[in-house]
Image (spheres, coloured by chain):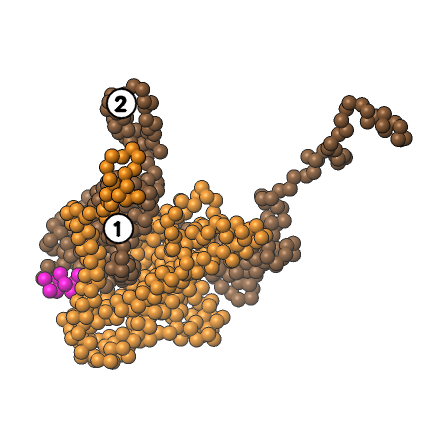
Amino acid sequence: MAGMTRPGYDFVPLRRDVRSRVGPADRVFRLVARSGGGLVLVIMVLVGTFLAFRAAQALHKAGWSFLTTQQWSPDGGGFGIAAVIVGTVLIALVAIVVAVPLAAGTALYISEYAPSRIRRTLISLVDLMAAVPSVVYGLWGAFLLQWQVIKLSKWISDWFGWIPVFQVDGVTRHDPLATRTVYTSSTFIAGIVVAMMVAPIACSIMREAFGQAPPGEREGAYALGATRWGMIRSVVLPFGRGAIIGGTMLGLGRALGETIAVVMIISPVFQIQPHILENGTSSVSSLIALRYGESSPFGISALMAAGLALFALTLLVNFAAASVVARSRSGAVSEV
Amino acid sequence: MTAVETTAENRKPVAPPRTTVPDRGLPSNAQARRRLGGVRSTDMLALFGAMAASLTMTALLWTELSPFTGVVGYVVTSWFLFVLTYAVLVSFDEDRPTMWDRLVSAVVHSLAFVLLAVLLVVIVYTIYRGWSAMVHLNFYTQDLRDAGPLDPLTVGGVEHAIVGTLVEIGITLAIAVPRGLIGAIFLHEIPGPFSRFVRTIVDAMTALPDIVAGLFIYATLILIFGLGFSGFAASCALAVTILPIIIRAGDVVLRLVPGNLTEASYALGSGQWRTVWHVVLPTARSGLATAVILGAARAIGETSPVLLTAGFAADLNANPFSGPMVSLPLEAFEAVQSPQPAMIARGFGSAATLLVLVLLLFAVARILGGRGAGQLSAGQLRRRAAASRRDKAPTWTFRPRSTPPPVTTAAP
């Protein structure tokens, strides 16, 4: 058609340039936006660099024993993160074991069972629970929950003490006069409190994915005669599998770094404590929170090294979570 | 009938019936309508029977077989017994898939109930324990300069912590909100490998332990630049903590802006900047406000970054650049370390005040964020209708009388 005179037009239409021209305002906009994205990168790199820079002195002196030493006395004797890392991981594992069923159950309830008129209220409540300050959870755990849970701890250790994890040293079984304090400030209690803090985070990730399960497949399952659980098992859960794993990992990352609630509950012990019901444990973040004030410059450097280890651990967990979530089918919604 | 009669009948002008209505005997509505939903008595019997059985079995177990005390343990044990009994009871009446359906339904309901009950208990318990301190007006108007741990609750308060919290949150938002929104716009507007990478980093940074953020500011601002413990250092640490939260939440909200709105804007010839400023941001305004408020609610309650960077003092300090500045979570954390009941009550009071602030922020977020992107409030609808009328007016005067007026929709 190009070059021919159309009826009704007395000019020859030229080939038009359909590329968009980027004006100066748009150039500035893109530059600012890119720098905003770059800022996040810069902060993350700075966090890693500064921690590594400050930690270098301590790491240089300790060498590989930093990973294997249990005690923490940087100014005399050795120091290492073996005990605190084990404590951190144990607290986080207890938290995840408690939190994931709670989060998955609540997410399923909100997306599948709850009446639609209270659904938004429930979502806000779960979001509110994620925003309740950690110090409030810490107060609740230390002043109320602990005294309830120690009785459960005693019962578990009495009856299931033959499982090594539930073993408690220094108490005889079914001794009515046994002191209760041996069960306080334990990994178990700290883990339960941290679980209440990570459950809403994991819950909201799972709920979003469950809610996006394709309605056609849901109705197909019902049309084939499935019960509600049959539909959930064959449509919603496979669709949300990535979100369940990803939410769990994000919760784990959060649980590894939780500080204040753990500090308020545990009593620090610098040796590996594999018995989760027994008094005394430790975590990297509580170590930093307890020791930052009284440390010499070398002690600060050692704390920075511990912080660097925690940073690396959470980064690892989160990249794993991100890759799992990204690979899953859920959340990949194309715009219609 | 004979053939003659038939032919005689056939000669009649009346056509034979082409359709017949079968005789069903009874009218069809006599059949009982089946109930597809609702509750049957057997369901209720199974549910309450299982509850009663589990409670009594636990009582028997605990008083006679394995002696034990404590509410939590009782509830946990009877819950497990309840699930078992309920499964057995339902399986008497129903088939296997229905039994699993009922069982999972009971488990899911109780899990959701536990989580929400924990939220309720946490809030009520904190306010209950802090109430004795919160009822005194001096709790909000005095600081702890003159009040020792042994002084009664009528002396001293947490004014310094309230002021510190407000100052710190103000500076934090001033630092983090513009950068966070720009970051969110970057992720949404400039897709590509770089923004995918940034998104991964933001996701990782969301779970950056808050104590590490505090440690970072401690290592840089305080140890290297010699700023000293101050409200500004605490605000920087808090900003590092909430920046990724605002970016993530903002990115999610921006994704909800309908694509046809932005495409219409581009089709009308406006550039990217103009589209973002006049179409994307106004459409997502309420969602972005919610994202910011959720970030603020998170920052207001953070303790560990503040613990490392703000220092601790008992008197009022409104200057964020010099001297230690206490915030409510830090005050609560430090106060409950004391063995004195009055100090513990003050700690709970600080925590409850903080909780009330968070609840307020949430209520505001709920009111603002009650609508999705593009849904307008009543006031916005009225303003838009007025704007349409204004836009319409000159068109009327310039249009020739012969052509009909354009069909304008005042509002969607």
The residue at which mark 1 appears reads as B189
Residue B56 seen anywhere in this rendered image of the structure: no
In this picture, residue B173 sits left or right of residue B14? left
| Magenta stretch encompasses residue A110 | no
Q: Is residue B221 magenta?
A: yes
In the depicted view, which residue is nearer to us: B160 or B374?
B374
Q: Which chain is orange?
A: A
Q: Which mark is residue A250?
A: none
* Chain designation of label 2: B
Segment colored magenta: B216-225
Q: Secondary structure at mark 1?
A: helix
- Please tell me which residue is depicted at 12% across the width and 64% down the height of the picture: B223
Graded by Cα atoms within 10 Å as few (under 14), some (14 to 19) or many (20 or more), the crowding at tag 1 reads many
Q: In the figure, the brown chain has which letter? A: B
Q: Nearer the viewer, mark 2 or mark 1?
A: 2
In the rendered view, tell whether residue B249 sits above or below residue B208. above
Of marks 2 and 1, which one's residue comes earlier in the chain? 1
Q: Residue at x 9, y 62 (%)?
A: B226
Q: Position of residue A239 (x, y in %)?
A: 45, 57
Q: Is residue B283 above or below residue A59?
A: above
Q: Label 1 near label 2: C-beta < 8 Å?
A: no
Mark carried by residue B399: 2
